[in-house]
Amino acid sequence: MPLRAPKGFIDESDPKVCQIGHPAPPWLVNYADLMTEMVCFFVILYALSAVLNKDVQQAVKDVEEAKKNIHAEIDVKIDREGMKISIQEKGDMAFFASGKADVTAGMLSILDQIAPTIKNLSKNFDIVVEGHTDNVPINDEYFGSNWELSSARATTVVEYLIKDKDFSPQYLAAMGYGQYRPVCPANDTPECKAKNRRVVFFVKTVTPHGAPPSPGAAPASSAGPGEGVKAPAQGAAPAAPPAGGTP
């Protein structure tokens, strides 16, 4: 027994209903092409939003100029997520003492030179400081893993920017990735390990200050002087006194 359409519904035998296997109306082909082109157009605009931002363009120029006086590898990359300023160790100059979260004099010099550029970006965008280590394991009384060490190092950088460079803690966060996002996957030579021991400033250009929060986002809270520093639950650790280890 064939099913009858519920009251108020159009019967499937009605000519207005497109039967399965029947061709769509001719106008629908052009309409579908137009919608596809519109989607592509807005995706391209979204991807270029960071590149076209004047503050980001100026920041790229400032970082390129600062590279001339910095003894470190600095790479600037802009993608759909935002802008990333990656600072890698070069030569004998280390950013942190081995197995510790204390910044060296050389790292402080680098931070002093790029801080004005990053501070200008922090006026409009949130900034996440990422800590990365090589694959040399660590497990001592202060750090149980490279996750904790990298988080502590990122937190130390954030605290320096807040306390010494007058950054707003509301727009800064710290995050540690340990050895799990290497730029040199081999991790088998001193040069390769030095590249992986890096600090990355991730400028989230896709969410400028004042933009409406994304669905499901937690409401902003009033942060105190030290509450703007964040770290992932799996690797959060405060800066600690000197300890042994060789990451």
Image (cartoon, rainbow, N blue to C red):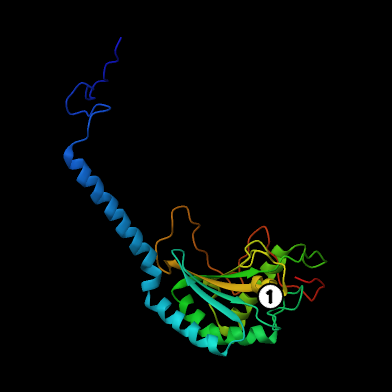
Image quarter of residue 195:
bottom right
- Farthest residue, direction top: 1
* Location of residue 68 by image quarter: bottom right
Tag 1 secondary structure: helix
Figure quadrant of residue 106: bottom right
Give the amino acid at mark 1.
Glu
Q: Is residue 243 left or right of residue 191?
A: right
The quadrant the N terminus occupies is: top left
Image point (22%, 35%), residue name: 24
Q: Residue at x 43, y 74 (%)?
A: 124
* Image x and y of residue 119, in percent: 50, 80
Give how far across and how far down residue 99 sits, in percent. Answer: 77, 72
> In the rendered view of the protein, which quadrant contains the C terminus?
bottom right
Point out residue 174 in the picture as x, y percentages from the top left corner.
61, 69
- Count of residue discs: 1
Q: Is residue 72 left or right of residue 7?
A: right
As drawn, 112 above or below 228: below
Q: Position of residue 184 (x, y in %)?
A: 63, 67
Return the residue at label 1: 191
Q: Is residue 99 left or right of residue 131?
A: right
Compared with 39, 24 (above or below) is above
- Tell me if 128 is positioned left or right of 145 in this view: left
